[in-house]
């Protein structure tokens, strides 16, 4: 059985040793942008730092970066520095409680460490009154249990094409981050943060004042002070339960961006009467600037049971239970439903998947497309580029199954980590890392595994593009990472902690915080887990991730919103 692993090849020359300029050595991809580091610690695969006295136009707080591994478990890169802990306090000391998932901080009311007077701790709750409590309450009102609460949520970072302003000098000085909550025939667009002089300022405090509600599927006039816009009815009524959202953007000075949402009844896109959206290069300003009051949702295509939307390289990829399609955003007119699209896959186009098979998840990056199904994981074939204009159908893609040691056939969910924080960059830079769950609900079991994705810039897809990490329980027998015991269909990681949703429908909704001392071969990980139970809730959890703006962990479901801050 595995006891430990090490690198046995010694460094012989200078070229064998990492330099400070090597990507693998640059934690966070470079210096912490917020300012001088006042405290630092390492836990698990993550590096955490505190900033007490921020640089000009920056905000203090806690920030972290997570290691990206190659197939042998060697560090090949790092995720970008991201705020964690849900706070912009002046923090001069920080400690992480890995078992409870909370940060303990030494906080000053100024940039002077001599004025430290407060010790704070993050908690799992409906939110801090000075942070996201108002948003939790608002979403509880807009998404009541009578319409099954929140049925989907997506975090769109401030670096998302279509949100960030690319016309400033330097680019990115303004723009916003969005959270989009979805439910039965309605969505809420939440401004979770806004860039001011380049620094991302999380939205906190009062979300309810000037929150706008539009009930005919179209926008009205939005005041600059609004932080939440809720839209229902109209074309959204035809979508029914809405489960996913994405910004479909065409890059370029004159490119247009659109908000697309999908669900059981199909796909709808927010569009102006002439078929345009908003200018991609200008992005979205604070207070929803560049969204106009003549925009309305239009039903497009003939999709149903849409599970996920991803935009990459001017294409919108639409994953449904029964197919994967690629829409040419620039060539389509959403206002008239003139859609230029290519069908990329049905279950029967994937080797070993039957006509009754289901497509469960996808990741798209550059040339690469990954599709998770009830019978394994598939990629485009060797030498294939999923974004090539010459692709005419499934036969052009030569779908190939990805060998994954000792996983269960259904791959239910994939959680990517990249050097930019955007899933579309999985196959760029140093390449990315994907955590995924394979689960068997009939036998109440699931496993978490890991795979490394290589850089495809200038390279072709081949058998080495995606490789499982060399996780071993028993010598020479590659395996999954950890056994998750019962059936669990969501996972998320912050480098030092792993969270997974519990699917026991006989108890209130809960999330398992896996133990921080978990290593490869850890048996029955959830038996040693700390369970986060949402009080007085029902039992459906649909979203588990970290806010890119505030750094707070967000749990969403038919109960509303639960956070750690």
Image (tube, rainbow, N blue to C red):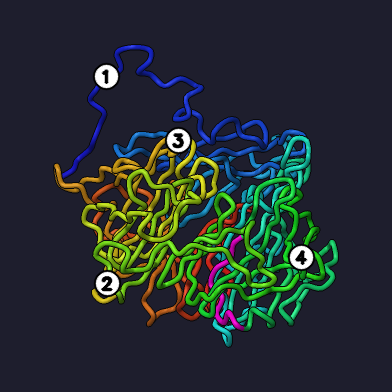
**Label 3 crowd (10 A; few <14 / some 14-19 / many >=20):** many
Q: Is mark 3 on a helix, strand or loop?
A: loop
Q: Distance between the residues labelled 1 and 3?
A: 23 Å
Mark toward the start of the polypeptide (3 vs 2)? 2
As drawn, 343 above or below 42: below
Which one is earlier in the sequence, the residue at label 1 or at label 4?
A: 1
Pick out the residue farthest to the top: 13
Q: Which of labels 1 and 3 is toward the front?
A: 3
| Mark sitting on residue 44 | none
Among numbered discs 3 and 4, the one appearing first in the sequence? 4
Q: Mark 4 points at which residue?
A: 206
Q: Is the N terminus in the top left, top right, bottom left or bottom right quadrant?
A: top left
Above-or-below relation of 421 to 335: above
In the image, the segment drawn in magenta is 238-246
Q: Which residue is drawn at 57% across and 40% down?
A: 81
Q: Which mark is residue 354?
A: 2
């Amino acid at each position: 059985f595995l006891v430990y692993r090490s690198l046995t090849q010694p460094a012989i020359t200078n070229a064998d040793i990492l330099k400070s300029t090597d990507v693998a050595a640059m934690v966070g991809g470079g210096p912490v942008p917020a300012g001088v580091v006042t405290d630092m610690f390492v836990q698990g695969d993550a590096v955490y730092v505190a900033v007490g006295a921020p640089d000009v136009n920056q905000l203090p707080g806690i920030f972290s970066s997570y290691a990206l591994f190659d197939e042998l478990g060697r560090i090949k890169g790092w995720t970008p520095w991201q705020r964690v802990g849900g706070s912009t306090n002046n923090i001069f000391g920080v400690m992480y409680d890995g078992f409870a998932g909370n940060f303990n901080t030494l906080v000053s009311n100024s940039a002077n460490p001599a004025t430290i007077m407060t010790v704070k701790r993050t908690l799992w709750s409906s939110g801090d009154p000075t942070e996201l409590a108002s948003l939790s309450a608002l979403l509880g009102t807009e998404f009541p249990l009578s319409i099954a609460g929140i049925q989907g949520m997506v975090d769109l970072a401030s670096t998302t094409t279509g949100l960030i302003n690319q016309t400033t000098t330097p680019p990115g000085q303004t723009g916003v981050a969005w959270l989009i909550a979805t439910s039965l025939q309605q969505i809420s667009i939440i401004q979770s943060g806004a860039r001011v002089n380049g620094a991302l300022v999380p939205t906190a405090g009062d979300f309810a004042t000037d929150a706008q509600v539009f009930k005919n599927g179209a926008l009205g006039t939005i005041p600059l002070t609004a932080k939440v816009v809720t839209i229902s009815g109209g074309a959204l009524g035809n979508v029914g339960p809405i489960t996913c959202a994405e910004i479909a953007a065409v890059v370029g000075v004159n490119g247009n961006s659109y908000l697309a949402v999908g669900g059981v009844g199909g796909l709808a896109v927010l569009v102006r009467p002439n078929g345009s959206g908003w200018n991609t290069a200008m992005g979205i300003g604070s207070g929803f600037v560049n969204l106009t009051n003549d925009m309305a949702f239009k039903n497009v295509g003939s999709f149903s049971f849409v599970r996920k939307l991803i935009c990459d390289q001017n294409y919108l990829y639409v994953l449904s239970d029964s197919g994967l399609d690629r829409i040419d955003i620039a060539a389509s007119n959403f206002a008239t439903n003139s859609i230029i699209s290519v069908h990329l896959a049905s279950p029967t186009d994937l080797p070993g998947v039957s006509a009754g098979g289901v497509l469960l998840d996808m990741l798209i990056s550059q040339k690469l497309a990954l599709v998770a199904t009830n019978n394994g994981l598939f990629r485009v074939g060797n030498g294939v580029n999923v974004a090539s204009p010459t692709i005419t159908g499934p036969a052009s893609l030569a779908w190939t199954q990805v060998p994954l040691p000792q996983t269960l056939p259904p791959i239910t969910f994939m959680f990517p980590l990249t050097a930019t924080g955007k899933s579309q960059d999985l196959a760029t830079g140093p390449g990315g890392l994907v955590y995924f769950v394979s689960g068997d609900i009939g036998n109440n079991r699931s496993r978490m595994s890991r795979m490394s994705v290589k850089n495809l810039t200038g390279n072709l897809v081949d058998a080495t593009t995606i490789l499982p990490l060399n996780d071993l329980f028993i010598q020479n027998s590659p395996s999954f990472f950890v056994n998750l015991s019962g059936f669990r269909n969501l996972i998320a990681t912050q480098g030092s902690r792993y969270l997974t949703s519990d699917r026991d429908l006989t108890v209130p909704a809960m999330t398992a915080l896996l133990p921080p001392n978990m290593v490869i071969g850890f048996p029955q990980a959830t038996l040693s887990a700390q369970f986060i139970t949402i009080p007085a809730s029902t039992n459906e959890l649909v979203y588990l991730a970290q806010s890119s703006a505030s750094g707070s962990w967000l749990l969403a479901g038919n109960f509303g919103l639960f956070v750690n801050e």
